[in-house]
Image (tube, coloured by chain):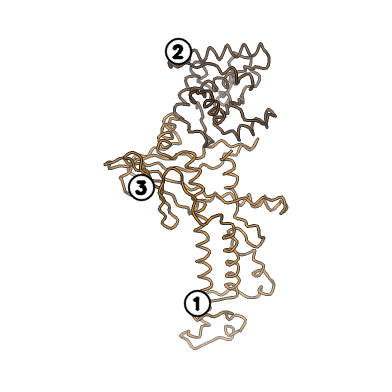
Amino acid sequence: MLKSVVRAVGAAVRLSSVATSTARTLPLSCPTLCSPSLATTRPFTRSLWMLNNNGASSGYRPKLFSSKALNPSISCGCGSLHTEGDKAFGAFLSDEIKEELKIQKNNNLPKMSGGWELALNGTEAKLSRNVAGEKITVTFNVNNSIPPNFEEEAEQGQQKSEEEEVQPEIVSSPNFVVDVTKQGAKHSLVFDCHFPEDEVSHGEGEEESDIFAIREVSFQPEGDTDWKENSYTLNTDALDWALYDHLMDFLADRGVDNTFADELMALSTAVEHKEYIKFLENLHGFVKCN
Amino acid sequence: MGVILRNLQKQVPLRRARLRKDVETLRHILGIHKFDLGIVCVDNHRIQQINNIYRKKNVPTDVLSFPFYEDLRPGKMPLPLHRDEQNLGDIFLGVEYVMKQCQEESLDLHETLTAVTAHGICHLLGYRHETEEEWTEMLQRENYILSEYNRLTGRSLEPLMKRCSQDR
């Protein structure tokens, strides 16, 4: 079943096939950083470094700070701190970026079927389409869209041998908001939707959540990005199920159905991965300072 | 509680409200509205998986029933002692499989799903069709349910006898 597959891979860690390229962890597992030769090199704080800087206003230099071992080993003249740790960090990031680019299936984002137009603004994505005088927009943010239970899976994975361990992929399943606006109307009907967490039944491992679900429904002023708290909000937790089904059918008629939700996950996963790589590149540039 | 409806597949565009309404009508006809019932719509892959696990038949099918009361005598209503026993069980509808049948036989999908669900509910109520006698008994019950359904809705559903002879 699609959902179970999606959930199975959603509970994953971004693990590359190369052992040194790890998940989104701090580079604590980087062999260079853990090597005994560097164990004595304390990381500096910025204030300590400023005391040791040639440009420090006080001419006084305590002997401790003139120790060669504590001087940065790299210098680029930018005036910022560079340490052996930064060098190792940069090398780690460089490898990580290479591995992430390797597992990036396609640089182009997957297309949504159904004539949706995509607009991206950083981690925010907006899909829109017009259907017979109605405008439908779907917005989501890829930040915090990876299910948080990957750590447990990673631990389980570590118990398996490398041969039998299948490296699952991360899947981004963001909350998304659907706005339906009728021509000339002052208010949009807004659906706050999400991908439900697994309802893990411990017997057969079956789960029975819908692929996506509506959490709240409300009328909001058309074109207003802020959620007006004084608009009545229909919460679906304690809702007549027949009404809920009509709301789901209403969305399906406007192209927001299980197929859409599945494609949205694929799109969000690709956007998230792209943003992650971009972040790593920025971080690499920041650490390297050039 | 009532009918818990889950749509876990994307192959078939389903009308959830229509399906729920039809299931509610069947519950009304059978006098089982105080019992909870799960309807789970799945694709061929998933129903084949379940069919293989529970019946050792590695093929997709139209419906699989998982009764809460496993030893009910056909026609006897369960007698729940507690609120959490007011549950008949779950019906997995192989909607992709049913849609293919509908396309081949030019049948309406949602009408056919109603007939298939009626068959599934009969299983939850203890009906079987492993012997000729059981088969006749179950068919009679299905005939009654669908004739009542037709009377209430103006439709003209029939039991899916051909398919029922192959699947439990």
Label 1: element kind: loop
**Can you identify the residue that label 1 sits on?**
A80
- Mark nearest the camera among 2 and 1 is 2
Q: Taking A171 as reference, is B18 left or right?
A: left
| Residue indicated by mark 2 | B151
Residue located at (41% from left, 40% from top): A216
C-alpha span from label 1 to label 3: 42 Å
Q: CA distance from mark 2 to mark 3?
A: 48 Å
Q: Chain ID for label 2?
A: B
Q: Quadrant of the C terminus of chain B?
A: top right
Label 2: how many Cα within 10 Å (few below 14, some 14–19, many 20+): few
Q: Which chain is orange?
A: A
Residue A136 in percent (x, y) is at 37, 43
CB under 8 Å between callouts 2 and 1?
no
- Image mark 3: chain: A
- In depth, the one of B2 and A136 nearer the eye is A136
**Which residue in the protein does label 3 denote?**
A227
